[in-house]
Image: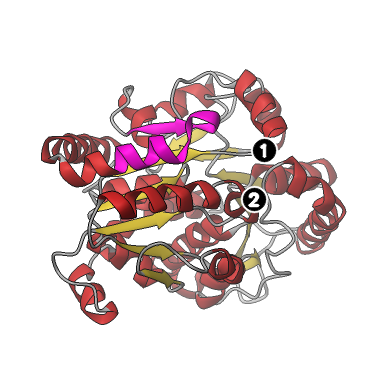
Amino acid sequence: MSGEGKDGRKTLMLVCGEPSGDLLGAELMASLKRLAGDGVNIVGVGGPAMAREGLQSLFSLDATAVMGLREVVPAIPRILARVRQAADYAVQTHPDALVVIDSPDFTHRIARAVKKRDPSIKTVNYVAPQVWASRAYRAKAMARYFDLILALFPFEVSFFEKYGLRAVFVGHPVIERRARMTGGEALRARLGIGADAPLLALLPGSRSSEIRFIFPIFRAAVEILARRIPGLVTVLPTVPHVAARVRERAAGWPTPLHILEKEDDKYAAFDAADVALAASGTVTAELALARTPMAVAYRVGGLTYALAHRLMTVPYMTLVNILLGRRAIPEFKQYDATPEALAAEVERLFTEEAARAAQVDAMNEFGRRLGEGDEVPSQRAARVLLDLIG
């Protein structure tokens, strides 16, 4: 049995677990439609971005977009129920391939369950966990339930193949968002921010746990900066499912503040901002491609950090630093991520042109190594998937 319908179309099942994966899934869907037209039917699990590309999701992402032990543990029954629901759907409908996107704690459970119940279904991981950075032994386990890895970094191919897992380098998806990082002048004008006003973009993350642990530190850092940088203005891009919590915690903000929920406004904010203060994650790669100087922070619960820190095998957490092999972007982990340290680094980026220029040079190198200027990653990924399903 195959996923090919009566009309001869192939079927791909895409599954993501949180907003960042939803965006990647939408870009992949758009590329699949460009290359295959109506020749591929797409089903699965996604959020608003994938819905705009035509996906009717099996369920919303609310139960699965969690992070950190204190947030994950209460959600486990809901997450496992969603895993069963998605795996049951895959086994019943038998797509030509199941493509799971990021969120390994959620999506890998689905791939593992599907492979166990029906080994004939091809399984693909798009945005594999960074097992080369921590717990490399997981790559051996992944080889038992994945047929293919769509690798974001060139060095991942040889790493996964060492464990018997086929991998193809497609490039990092953030590259194709570079073209959207425009409109900074128009955003400033619309929000009433002067062209010369010092503008800080604040990116505290899209998960509830990040808002809990990182947001208060960022706020305290901005309180310090407000005293040191006259006329400072802050823009804070967020996503709908945490926007209410962000607005509540932003009451009485120490500078003029603009909270932005639209995706296009987020990219315009990258273009408009002089400096960014960001939580560690994909957004740091986006800021790098926008050439926005930044300081980066990572903060989770104490127990989560104690467990994760012991397993880390790379010295950096920011993608630019990992790929370049040096601390080109200032990053502050856990107890080093204090308001004073973050404020000092952000102030330096506002006031020292040499510090800003050094970051931009590093970001240019990062873009080249990531495949900037070549075929866009989602289109490469779409080609590989279309070849896989024939």
Residue 128: quadrant of the picture: top right
Pick the front one: 188 or 387: 188
Residue 21: quadrant of the picture: bottom right
Pick the front one: 360 or 195: 195
Tags 2 and 1 touching, CB below 8 Å = yes
Q: Amino acid at mark 1?
A: Gly
**Percent x, y of residue 226:** 33, 55
**Percent x, y of residue 127:** 52, 44
Which residue in the structure is indicated by mark 2? Answer: 209
Q: Amino acid at mark 2?
A: Ser
Specify the quadrant that holds the N terminus.
bottom right
Q: Compared with residue 74, is residue 343 higher up or lower down, i.e. above or below?
A: above
SS type, badge 1: loop
What span is colored magenta in the figure?
330-346
Q: Is residue 16 left or right of residue 318?
A: right
Pick the front one: 32 or 9: 32
Identified at 64% across, 68% down, the residue is 43
